[in-house]
Amino acid sequence: MRSENQRRLSGELALLRIIAFKFLQAVPVILIISILAFLLLSLLPGDPAIIIAGEQASPEAVEHVRQQLGLDRPFLQQLAIWLLNLAQGNFGSSLILNQSVLSAVGERLPVTLSLAALSIAVTIPVGVFLGSLAAYYRQSWIDAGVMTFALLGVSIPAFWIAILGIILFSVHLGWVPSSGFTPISQGVGPWLSSVILPALILSLFQIGFLARMTRSAMLDVMGQDFIRTARAKGLSEWRTVSKHALRNALILIITATGILLSTAIGGSVVIEQVFALPGIGRMVVQAILARDYPLVQGTMLIFGFTFVLINLIVDVLYTLADPRVRHD
Amino acid sequence: MTDIGLEAIVSTAGLAPPRRGRSIRRLFRHRSFVIGFVIIVVLALAAIFAPLLTPLDPSAMKVRFRFRSPASDFIFGTDMFGRDIFTRVLYGARVSLFVGLAVSVISGFCGAVLGVVAAQFRKLDAPIMRLMDALMSFPAILLALGIAAALGPRVSSVIAALTVAYVPAGVRIVRAAALVVRELDYVQAARLSGASALRIIVRHILPNCFSPLLVHLTFIFAYAILAEAALSFLGVGVQPPLASWGNIIAEGRDYATEAWWVMLFPGIAISLAALGMNLLGDALRDVLDPRLKGGD
Amino acid sequence: MAAAPLLAIRDLTVQFRVDAGWVTAVEGVSIDIGEGDCVGVVGESGSGKSVTALSILRLHDRATTRIPNGSIVFKGQDLLKSSKRSLRGIRGGEIAMIFQDPMSSLNPVLTVSEQISETIQQHQKMSGTAARQRAVELLDLVRIPDARRRADDYPHRLSGGMRQRVMVAMAIACRPRLLIADEPTTALDVTIQAQILELLRELRQELGMSVMLISHDLGVIAEFAQSVVVMYAGRVVEQAPVAQLFRRPVHPYTVGLMAAVPKLDGDATRLSAIPGRIPGPQEDIPGCRFAPRCGFALNSCLQAPPPTELVGELHTVRCPPQVLALGDVNG
């Protein structure tokens, strides 16, 4: 018979083993992402060198581009070089910005991160709260209200609302600047006022989604027998919901949050354009329009890796949240 | 949200093959279905009969009439080139609805094929799904953006780009449904009685994947409309003078304070179209498989 | 004998909301449970026995259930009219309940001791450690082997019988005066069933608590209950001490029920079944709900609700005397 300490240790080891296994499973996906990013150029119709140099470019210019990007080498060699570079942390260099992809992304990371972090910080508590409210008071006007809000969130174009928001809050009310980013080093106040509107708009559209998922999960859980048991034990409604229901709904909420992080990245692309925030999203859009394909490739790759990382974290959080998954 | 409808992916596969007559009647009793249906039908008719509804040419620039506010002769007003906004919105409807339809159908078809193949042929399952996983790791908007920009700014590029972005989700849904179906008793029985793989797929598996796929596709339609608008807004989709709701907003942005109507009406149009499809999708999901909704 | 019962359900009517309006699931139910009594409520699915039990602690879904009529008096207090706070004090404290499926009735993400401690700390001031200690003691009391180790397990690691024991432990944690057991053995193996019933019997004696046992299984009722309440289609049709009920069932439904049980002794004949089926709650039958299937029904049975007749000591039946007389002739 093992002591309690021994049991706990073997439990933790099992957990670590599961996590390590999940890391391993992510490797092939990362490999495929890398290859896909590489193929981005080759999959496009036409000669990549011409696409990058532009249709009006002279043959010399095209040839120069071809050599600079190593497009004259055999295909597999290009792939090998690409993967090798990646392994060394070299994601390529921007043609226009004159810096490595990593440093270009790094420069703009604070902007996108501020946006994403702020919006998530608002989205999660509000979304979970509204969703739980809607589930608890289901079929009431509260429920209908939250569901309508969520429906509008997936129907109204974000960029449009963003513009309207700028007109209202910047131009008419003058509460916040209409564009530009102030780094936090220049003061929390100015930083906040430069990102609060875009972050809130981003939130607005994500709250609906999270509320819907939370409501779904909570309805599922609230209908289960152990909720009735909790009530039968004399627990208050608040405790029943927060301790018993929410903890079980956590699993689905974690999934939803993972998805949220990815859509936040996608959404920030458009929002950054509208608000002229010098973030990663805006950089990618401009790079695409300017045909700076190495930059596009490298950044897409970073996005892909980030997504895999987020998925992994979500997966690990699952095993922590649901004891049933741990021991099998 | 101008991004992929990932909510649909999180839902599980429904099973009941719809009994057509009863389902259609139940659909119409649903209030949200009726509203959505009416919206979409009105928009579709407006798009199809656009030339009849407005005598004007959407690209006709009449500088004399620039910046007219909404009035009886220009219902939605005019823009900075004197083009009638109402006309442009109507023709924009053609683009958006066409893109939505094309993306839904094509991505649905590809998703169905890939999904069923992945579910039926175990050796192909892992590579297909890893590929789909990898595709889904890129933010859909960026994927679509990249492809559309590379192919050149036109409607077909947008359709191709969005199709690629949305196929993985469809594959997941169909595969999940197909996996469940192939374990059902009567499919096992068919296999045992020697039916060929193709016959099993066509007669048994596909019909059962139909409902979750249909629900999914209505949501894809909505997301495609929003995505096309965003892409056109960013400049990689439909280019002016061809009218798309997205590029009307882009053009109108610079004059937002003077001519608010230029931006307002296309935005409302996009919202209505997406809303209509979302309502349809919600109602379809309710009727075809309440389980997808997650307990109510 | 003349003392006020511990729990007195009088004239309880419970209704559910459906698309078309409200349907009556249970009507005019009156049941008394005295101190230390063991009352068995028996009936088929749809008889309303669970609905009645859930009403005692008002565990129904508020949005879809209403109780337009009746009173449930516990120690002088009408539970149907009590404040939420007062009700919470009683739930798990003075009146406890265990349910049919122990797997779904336990929270899968909390350990066993956490769930038991929670009950204790809800009703008594106790530190976490003390509560956990008490939880282990309770697990011992319900005969779970290796209680100290098991306390930290999650529900999915326990067998069905053990989970039900955990439910029992949770229920008796605060020494309730009344334990309501809604089909506690239905989801378990027959051998485990016997163990759980034995456990309940022992605890009843040790703690001196009353038990209301709900079951569709006549065997369980026969073995465990002291007095029996027979329910059909949302109404009580017969109440009697257990021996009396089994020896001499009076209501035509009870008679049919007993007859349907296959007997080991006697001739091997075809299983007898009561023709017809139970009416659903939405079916409106003005008179006796069993009349359409009753072999002895008179015309009046279909029109007017049957009266309550006393046919023996503590033995009541809802059936008019004329019909009873007919039934008697046939045994």
Image (tube, coloured by chain):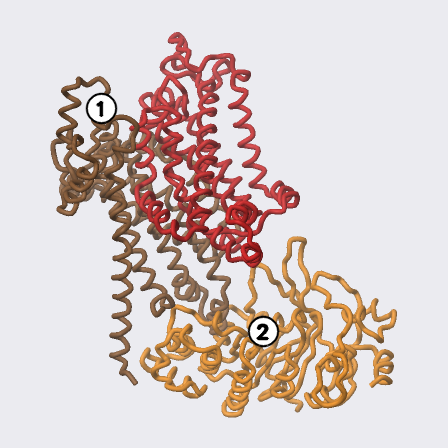
Q: Provide the chain ID for the residue under circle 1.
A: A
Q: Is B232 placed left or right of A293 in the picture?
A: right
Residue A206 is labelled as none
Which quadrant would residue B89 be assigned to in this image? top left
Pick the quarter of the image with the C terminus of chain A.
bottom left
**Mark 1 — residue?**
A50
- Amino acid type, callout 1: Ile
Q: Nearer the viewer, mark 1 or mark 2?
A: 1
Q: Nearer the viewer, residue B101 or A45?
A: A45
**Mark 2 — residue?**
C56
Pick the quarter of the image with the N terminus of chain A.
bottom left
Q: Which chain is orange?
A: C
Q: Can residue B42 be seen from the camera position used here?
A: yes
Q: Among all residues in the image, which is located at the extreme front?
A: B194
Q: Nearer the viewer, residue A326 or A186?
A: A326
Q: Residue at x 50, y 13 (%)?
A: B73
Q: Is residue C166 above or below residue A293?
A: below
Mark 1 element type: helix
- Amino acid type, callout 2: Ile
Q: Provide the chain ID for the residue under circle 2.
A: C
Q: Is A167 placed left or right of C35 in the picture?
A: left
Q: Is residue C310 above or below residue B119?
A: below
Give the x, y percent position of residue C7.
60, 80
Q: Are marks 1 and 2 in contact (CB under 8 Å)?
A: no
Which quadrant would residue C33 be assigned to in this image? bottom right
Q: Is residue C142 above or below residue A95?
A: below
Q: Residue at x 48, y 80 (%)?
A: C161
**Badge 1, how many Cα within 10 Å: few under 14, some, many 20+?**
some
Give the x, y percent position of residue A87.
16, 47
Q: Which chain is brown?
A: A
